[in-house]
Amino acid sequence: MSIIKLPLNYEGSQGERVLYTLFDSGASFSCINADYLDGLEKPVKMRHPKEVATASEGHYVKITSAVRLDFYLNDILLSDEFMVVPNLSEEAILGVTTLQKWRIKLDFENDTVIIDPKIAKFILKDLK
């Protein structure tokens, strides 16, 4: 099994920071480790917490808050919601909902991340 993990620049309402981000096509949601939010963004409490399964069989994590963050991938500004997960093993994880939303493809043979050029053009047009 291949793993793609890259440093990405994240921006929130309180500042910015680089986080080593795991690209995980097996994760439903994008997640961020609660320990890395200080100086980046304040979490928003969810009205209905989520209990999600982890990679460990029979193990669940209760998620009670989320944040919206901007992040840069190949110098393209993207954004999404990240579930705030206490004791997450990674600094951040980009899950399948984010990958699909932005048409991000993972090339495990070459350890690269590919963003659809049509999406990049669309985003750049919106900024002008």
Image (tube, helix red, strand yellow):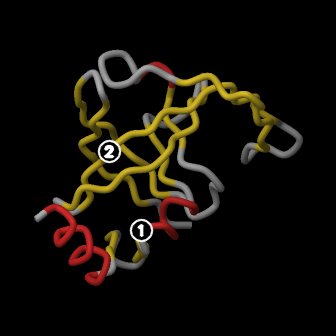
Going from the N terminus, do you reach mark 1 or mark 2 first?
A: 2
- Residue 7 on image: x %, y %: 27, 46
Residue that sits furthest to the left in the current view: 128
Residue topped by disc 1: 102
Residue 44: percent from left, percent from top: 55, 24
Disc number placed over residue 87 in the picture, else none: none
Q: Residue beneath label 2, please? A: 70
10 Å neighbourhood of mark 1: few (<14), some, or many (≥20)?
Answer: some
Which residue is situated farthest in the top direction here?
38
List x then y, in percent, for residue 103.
43, 74
63, above or below 99, in the image: above
Q: Is residue 40 above or below residue 72?
A: above
The residue shown at (76%, 36%) is 50
Residue in the image at 48% along x and 52% along y: 94
User: Which quarter of the picture shows residue 88?
Assistant: top right
Q: In this view, does 26 lie to the left or right of 38?
A: right
Amino acid residing under circle 2: Asp
* On-image quarter of the N terminus: bottom right
Of 26 and 57, which appears nearest the observer? 26
Residue 65 sits in quarter: top right
Q: Label 1 sits on what residue type?
A: Trp
Please tell me how many numbered marks the rendered image carries.
2
Q: Is mark 1 on a helix, strand or loop?
A: loop
Q: Under tag 2, what secondary structure?
A: strand
Quarter-of-image position of residue 121: bottom left
Residue farthest along the right direction in this orientation: 58
Which residue is painted at 30% across and 17% down in the image?
39
The residue that appears at 83% across and 36% down in the rendered structure is: 59
Would you call the spot at circle 2 few (<14 residues within 10 Å), some (14-19), or many (20 or more)?
A: some
Q: Distance from label 1 to label 2 (Cα)? A: 13 Å
Lateral position of residue 27 relative to residue 115, left or right = right
Q: For the C terminus, give its image quadrant.
A: bottom left
